């Protein structure tokens, strides 16, 4: 290695240092290497440039040593060097706010120089530190280049993450540490913080979970496929996407997997506000919360009027029932789908095909005398095969009723 005996401030460097001690920012700009031979009477303080500059190098790092000196680190590489030279001179350059860039300090090796070969078979890559005087200058900076970066073993040991039950002794902002709890932590300048990556386990903003809730990604089963078995789908950890249509003013077309919720209070007519089309299939629940209604005809049917209208005797309903008095059956024509009686709760399936329009299910009549409760299984067909069913319709009650309706589209 070339034997440089320390740096010497040039006269311009001394002038700039005096300004820096008075508050001017001292900014180092670059390093130059040269092969100039100095005559015996050379006064380095009077140099404005190297005697024979050969190579300009950017500064990679600056560190104030705290003893009136600063350490400048640069990378010596012969990449792109067309002609080799003896490295006899090192120049440190800085920016003077009054006269521009100057030679701040210089170092000389003379006949103790190293030869830097041209770019070719021999590759040269060395990290070199050089120190120079800054005295008590308060503001010291450098123009740092990240185009060439060579890390020393000490650099790597300093920045590499550490693992262990005890926090690292060497800390700096951004230092990484894997603790005994297996969490990655970083040092924020005053304390260790858990390093958390928000939404790293999400798809479209929903978290994956082994115990999912509504709108949560369903986990894979043992065969690495979604568990869509009836046992799983009908459990409490999975629900359809719900749309509240209680105050809707126009029909909404449910998508497959969507559930409409319609609440009502003390009324005899509830428009569902659900658009429908041939080929659709629904599961629906009518839940009435008042046992006797508030007024109206106690023994009349509950009807689902498709397209929000009635069609005289176009529907036929067959049903069988059982109550405390016995059992029986009936079959009769209606002007809409019969889907309940009095103030009953109904579970039904709704099928809409041009050639087959049907509502089937069962309803429970509950009340206040010994004939109740009554369970009724029914199937009601709309015998018109030409009229299109475009609006799921309106549910009418024979008496004022309160409750809610759920409608799920399954196909």
Image (tube, rainbow, N blue to C red):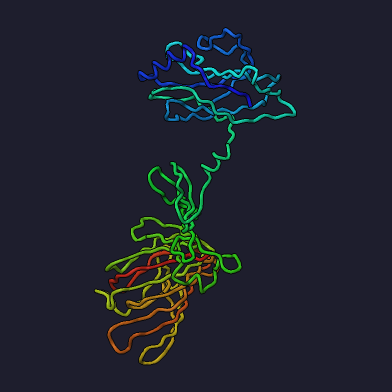
Vertical comparison of 268 with 132: above or below: below
> Could you tell me residue 392's position as x and y percent?
44, 64
Residue furthest out toward the left: 294
Instruction: Judge by depth and name the residue closer to the eye, 205 or 51.
Output: 51
Instruction: Judge by depth and name the residue closer to the eye, 116 or 331.
Output: 116
> Could you tell me residue 155's position as x and y percent?
54, 39
Q: Residue at x 55, y 30 (%)?
A: 146
Q: Residue at x 62, y 17 (%)?
A: 110
Residue furthest out toward the bottom: 325
> Could you tell me residue 206's position as x and y percent?
46, 56
Residue 315: image quadrant is bottom left
Vertical comparison of 224 with 376: above or below: above
Q: Residue at x 54, y 71 (%)?
A: 229
Q: Residue at x 37, y 19 (%)?
A: 21
Q: Is residue 204 visible?
A: no
Instruction: Judge by depth and name the residue closer to the eye, 66 or 331.
Output: 66
């Amino acid at each position: 290695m070339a034997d440089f005996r320390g740096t010497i401030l040039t006269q311009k460097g001394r002038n700039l240092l005096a300004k820096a001690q008075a508050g001017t920012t001292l900014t180092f700009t670059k390093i130059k290497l040269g092969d100039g031979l100095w005559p015996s009477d050379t006064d380095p303080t009077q140099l404005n440039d190297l005697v024979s500059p050969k190579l300009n190098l950017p500064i990679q790092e600056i560190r104030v040593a705290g003893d009136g000196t600063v350490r400048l680190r640069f990378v010596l590489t012969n990449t792109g060097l067309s002609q080799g030279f003896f490295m006899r001179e090192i120049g440190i350059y800085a920016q003077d706010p009054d006269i521009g860039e100057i030679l701040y300090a210089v170092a000389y090796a003379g006949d103790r120089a190293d030869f830097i070969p041209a770019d070719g078979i021999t590759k040269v890559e060395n990290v070199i530190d050089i120190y120079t005087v800054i005295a008590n200058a308060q503001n010291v900076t450098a123009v740092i280049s990240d185009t060439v970066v060579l890390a020393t073993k000490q650099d790597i040991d300093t920045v590499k993450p550490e693992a262990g039950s005890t926090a690292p002794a060497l800390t700096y902002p951004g230092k990484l540490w894997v603790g005994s709890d297996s969490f990655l932590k970083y040092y924020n300048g005053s304390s260790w913080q858990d390093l958390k990556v928000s939404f790293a386990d999400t798809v479209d903003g929903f978290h994956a979970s082994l115990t999912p809730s509504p709108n949560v990604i369903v986990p894979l089963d043992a065969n690495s496929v979604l568990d869509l078995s009836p046992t799983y789908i009908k459990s409490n950890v999975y629900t359809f996407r719900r749309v509240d249509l209680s105050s809707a003013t126009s029909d909404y077309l449910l998508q497959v997997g969507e559930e409409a919720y319609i609440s009502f209070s003390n009324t005899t007519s509830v428009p569902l506000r659900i658009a429908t089309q041939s080929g659709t299939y629904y599961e629906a629940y009518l839940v009435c919360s008042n046992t006797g209604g508030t007024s109206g005809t106690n023994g009349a049917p509950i009807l689902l009027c498709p397209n929000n209208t009635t069609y005289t005797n176009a529907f036929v309903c067959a049903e069988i029932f059982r109550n405390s008095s016995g059992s029986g059956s009936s079959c009769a024509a209606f002007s809409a789908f019969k889907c309940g009686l009095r103030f009953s709760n109904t579970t039904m399936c709704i099928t809409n095909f041009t050639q087959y329009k049907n509502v089937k299910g069962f309803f429970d009549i509950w009340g206040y005398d010994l004939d109740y409760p009554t369970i009724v299984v029914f199937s009601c067909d709309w015998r018109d095969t030409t009229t299109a069913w475009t609006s799921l319709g309106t549910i009418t009650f024979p008496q004022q009723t309160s409750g809610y309706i759920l409608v799920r589209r399954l196909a």
